[in-house]
Image: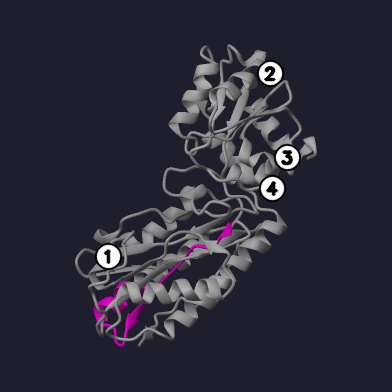
Amino acid sequence: MSDTLLLPVLKILEDQDLDAIAFVPGANFRRLFNADFHLMERPLVVIIPRDAEPVAVVPNLELLSFRSIGFPGPVFDWRDEDGYQDAFAKAAQALPMLENAERFGLEAQRMRVFEHMALSEVFPAARFVDAHNALSQMRLMKTDKEIEQLRKAIKISEIAFEKTLSSVKVGQTETEIEAILLRNLFESGADGLAFDPIVAAADNSAKPHAHARADYRIKPGDSLLFDFGARWNGYNADITRTVFVERVSDRDRAFYETVLAANAAGKAATRAGQTADQVDDEVQKVLEASEFSAFRRHKTGHGLGLDVHEAPHIMRGNPARLEAGMVFTIEPGLYREGECGVRIEDDVLVTSGGCDCLTNLPTALRVVG
């Protein structure tokens, strides 16, 4: 591994006046070391200080795999029968300058309590701080290779979705349709799932994070919401489409067209130089001006990449300025409790003059079955 790969972390350490940052397996680890390790009951922690070489605490069963990444500092491994605390103690001895660290950064939305406790025991005088927001900047701008991988994950997802729609019939349960979608995702080339998909009909579609039901059979006139995504080479798609089964009422059509207009407004507002607040505001204004304003539930979107939800968060009150190379979702929705939910979600790439919609599925209202 070239030390230059650690430059993004060294810059964060300097900019945020941090003495060190501790990493566990996850998206930030993957971005730095181009390697995936399981986040499991055996702690694997990498500590990168500002003014010394990094150190790692690694379970012995992962040692051969970890050596393959070319880690540039000492590695302290441990075996199950011995426990991990002695390895943490040896790591701390290798980093005496951190004994009284005033700002020791942690991945606070990723690290578990027991890993924090292990660090606290060997650095008892250190002051640990949440470095999540600073670290999120490291993955904001997607490289050309990352965009290519996202496009691949999205394309796989779209092929699977179209195959699934062609199989939808009145009388199927949500779980039956979900099983078809899952099979199609893997047959179309996914090497994993971005998340457990959502397949929800009628009143269940009014729950933004619904679970498929085995005891409800879809009926003519039902809304049918799909929220799904393939993972490919670690990168995630996140797409939502809502269709109607056999027919659609005038009210549901107006409901759908309102969400579609909000989706279009979000894409039209997306360009380098805009803020996340401004994009969300344009979306929310469309929903608020409609007769369905009371059925709004959530912000416009979130960043997408190695994590399904990452920075930037597209919501009112977020002054973060968009830059070319950012990728996020635009996913307005309306939800009539006990009746119907509609969400339309696209994945977009910010460009200097606007946005490139990476999602190519049609957004116009569709009737299936």
| Front-lying residue, 149 or 47 | 47
Label 4 element class? loop
Q: Residue at x 68, y 18 (%)?
A: 94
Q: Counting other residues with Cα less than 10 Å from the Cα at mark 2, is it few (<14), some (14-19), or many (20 or more)?
A: some
- Mark 1–mark 4 distance (CA, rounded to whole Å): 39 Å
- Mark 1–mark 3 distance (CA, rounded to whole Å): 49 Å
**Is any part of residue 264 visible from this angle?**
yes
Q: Amino acid at mark 4?
A: Asn
The residue identified by callout 2 is 94
- Dot 2 or dot 4: first in sequence order is 4
- Dot 1 or dot 4: first in sequence order is 4
Q: Residue at x 41, y 71 (%)?
A: 260
Q: Counting other residues with Cα less than 10 Å from the Cα at mark 4, is it few (<14), some (14-19), or many (20 or more)?
A: few
Q: Are marks 2 and 1 in contact (CB under 8 Å)?
A: no
| Front-lying residue, 146 or 286 | 146
Q: Which mark is residue 34?
A: 4
Q: Which residues are magenta?
A: 235-257
Residue 328 is situated, as x and y percent measured from the top left of the image, at: 53, 56
Q: Counting other residues with Cα less than 10 Å from the Cα at mark 1, is it few (<14), some (14-19), or many (20 or more)?
A: many
Q: Is residue 216 above or below residue 245?
A: above
The residue identified by callout 3 is 67
Quadrant holding the C terminus: bottom left
Q: Is residue 309 above or below residue 192?
A: above
Q: Nearer the viewer, mark 1 or mark 3?
A: 3
Left or right of residue 181, residue 234 in this image: right
Residue 202 is situated, as x and y percent measured from the top left of the image, at: 25, 73
Residue 313 is situated, as x and y percent measured from the top left of the image, at: 48, 48
The residue identified by callout 1 is 206
Residue sitting farthest toward the left = 338
